[in-house]
Image (tube, grey):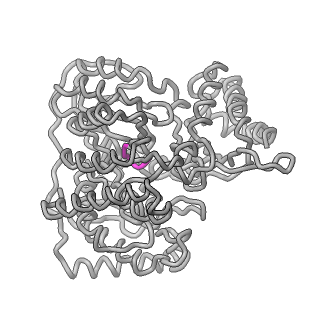
Amino acid sequence: MVDSKWLQTYREEIETFSGKIQDFQEGRLDKKDYKGYSGGMGSYAQRDPAKHMLRLRMPAGRLTVERLKFLADTVEKYGVRRLKLTTCETVQLHDLAAEQVPAIMGEAVGVGVICRGGGGDNPRNVMCSPLSGVQKGEAFDPSPWAAAVTDYLLSICRDIHMPRKLKIAFSNGVDDSVHSAFRDMGFQAREDGTFSLRIAGGLGAMGHRMGVLVEEAVNPQDVLYYVKAMVDTFCQHGNYENRAKARTRFMQDTLGPEGLKAAFLKNVEAAKAAGGLELPRLEALADVCGGDGTLDHPRAIPQKQLGMYAVKYHPIGGVLPVEKPAQLYAAIKDLCNAECRVGPDETLYIINLPAAGVEKVLAVTEDGAKTEFEYSVACIGATVCQQGIRDSQGLLQAAVKAVREAGIPDGALPKITVSGCPSSCAAHQAGTIGFQGGVRLEDKKPQPAFRIFLGGSDALDKARFGEAGAVILEKDIPALLVELGKAAAAAGQNWAQWSESHREDLNAIVEKYA
């Protein structure tokens, strides 16, 4: 963790931020200038500028028991009315009053939650496969390296000025829901104990790119040298003039993939020559206590540790009921090394549960998704987000309701991804079915609509982007999904089978709504 001197400076920054947010609230600071400052502290004003969001960044999505209790206590103390699990493995507190934001920031330090760099032109929350350390088949647990990279980035975040944000992810080698294949930096654990590394991938309004493979066997002790080299390469070659193109993926255009690789590896060598960043041997985060007994439940995942389980819980749209942290804390507080992990698909995983402890957690989380479709992902949407164009949460709720009422069987529809604008917060380009918020002209009048993307995937070593298709009116999308689900069910096939073997039928149904 960062040292006491760093934390003292951070506390001073919170005091300064307290003045800034009051200046904004009282009209002495305009929206643009305030956003430029608040983002670096992990907070933004919402569409209603009297309400604010605070992002609790948690490396590798680790919502430990201590952090879970802090979240539960914060909800009660400040009357928090909305919680959102995010696709960057953080928890967002919404609808906060101005004076509440810096107060919660300061209190979060006590459980190791640092909001600094949670937004703005900063290195963002370092992500990791959510079941790292417990997942069967994983090459090894990369979460200690995610923690080490977080500490390093926090230590330098005040000293660097990057064109835009930097997103880093670690895959455990069996799951790539963190999208290491197309992050700014994506480390994938290998069976030989090293990492393969891809850089300069990403999603967004100005195009999307797969990452460039620059190293197939990174020594884990050298990870920080590679991170420093990426920061240096971005600062040297990133676009400081045009924010729309100020992301690492655009260096593939300006330098070419091979030129980018050469520039990056040159910086790696320079970083190694300077020295000082070699990591010691890192161990697993905590020993997992043994368990006994067995159980069979669709939301209970057997861990690689004998007799231990993880439970998955997906609140619809990733909107976590505000009473849930307290309920989960009560269910796991007395269990050995149990904790929660926020997944990049807005699923909460409660891990390190003995069979005897699973039933209580299953009962507490019974209100979550029941089918593959209900595990769909949606950003917070335009009713809350200043940047949003469409109400992605409203669309997903309407779609879930329509699919339930139509009796579509589980598997006939896939998980979908819904972004309320081109910013790609839900990674709609990589969704099996993705939607991007926009408009469509009807009788020369703009109407709420979404562009559909078909055929994307974030499967390990099979990542691909979907094909952009028609722009469909928001009001028609639930009916479209119901019709697609009925067609697959009528053929007696799941979505993957039907969409592959009935492509013409799929396209014809979509075209009806175009």
Quarter of the N terminus within the rendering: bottom left
Q: Is residue 90 magenta?
A: yes
Residue that appears at 43% across and 47% down:
52
Assign the magenta stretch its main secondary structure.
Answer: loop
**197 in relation to 397, above or below:** below
Q: Tell me, yes or no, if residue 61 can be seen here.
A: yes
Between 198 and 453, the one nearer to me in the picture: 453
x and y percentages locating residue 391 in the rendered image: 60, 41
User: In the figure, is residue 375 to the left or right of 74?
Assistant: right
**36 in relation to 276, above or below:** above
Q: Is residue 106 magenta?
A: no
x and y percentages locating residue 433 in the rendered image: 62, 42
Total tally of numbered discs in the picture? 0
Residue that appears at 24% across and 24% down:
330
User: In the figure, is residue 51 to the left or right of 123?
Assistant: right
Quadrant position of residue 393: top right
Quarter of the C terminus within the rendering: top right
x and y percentages locating residue 435 in the rendered image: 63, 45
Residue that appears at 31% across and 64% down:
217
Residue that appears at 43% across and 75% down:
261
x and y percentages locating residue 138 in the rendered image: 31, 44
* Magenta stretch in the rendered image: 87-91
Q: Tell me, yes or no, if residue 494 can be seen here.
A: no
Between 199 and 231, the one nearer to me in the picture: 231
